[in-house]
Image: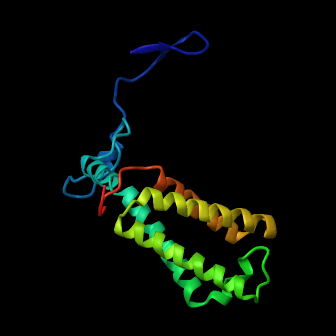
Amino acid sequence: MSSRSPRGRRRRTSAVAAPDLAAAAAPPGGASPPSRSRDGARPPGVTALLVGLEGWAPTAARLALGAVFLWFGSGELWQPRLWTGYVPLVPQTSGVAITLVLVHGALLLVLAASLVIGIAPRVAAGVGACFVAEIVVALTVHGGLNDISMRDLGVLGLALAVAGTSRHRLLLTR
């Protein structure tokens, strides 16, 4: 077999195939490790697992958002004085600030229950997204971008994702 080199001269090429490196790297016994094929396809077992998990992703996101709302709502109910500093336009030590934190905590618990139980989860996530958007804006305006506002921005994205999908499983109602 021959081919032309860049300068136009013929050069000899061998007809010997390149060694099979995958076979050389195979463990003893002939079994090859799972990997992607040359066309990029996954092995059938991995693909089946990922396709099976794909249907549960919205439910996992809904339950995670419910857990976040449950955590912060219960924290606001158990220790409202720790949260009064985040109430805008009201003195931190006032009874109004404590009342607003308690109401906010109770509403977060209602949203958490709705998300975890599966009663109108898209509505609960949408309302929760409004709550979290207000928090993100307030934190960013008063404190600038920091780790807390960026964390809440991630929670806002999760809430919007849950509100935007209808493929939830483990619902009490549809």
Residue at image position (28%, 47%) is 43
Q: Which of these two is toward me, 44 or 98?
A: 98
Quarter of the image containing the C terminus?
bottom left
Quarter of the image containing the N terminus?
top left
The answer to whether residue 98 is above or below residue 162 is: below
Residue at image position (35%, 45%) is 36
* Residue 116 location, quadrant: bottom left
Q: Position of residue 77 (x, y in %)?
A: 56, 86
Looking at this rendering, what residue extends furthest in the left direction? 29
Q: Which of these two is toward me, 45 or 116?
A: 116
Q: Position of residue 15 (x, y in %)?
A: 35, 23
* Residue 122 location, quadrant: bottom left
The answer to whether residue 8 is above or below residue 60 is: above
Tell me if 156 is positioned left or right of 114 in this view: right
Tell me if 31 is positioned left or right of 65 in this view: left
Q: Which of these two is toward me, 109 or 42?
A: 109
Residue at image position (45%, 70%) is 66
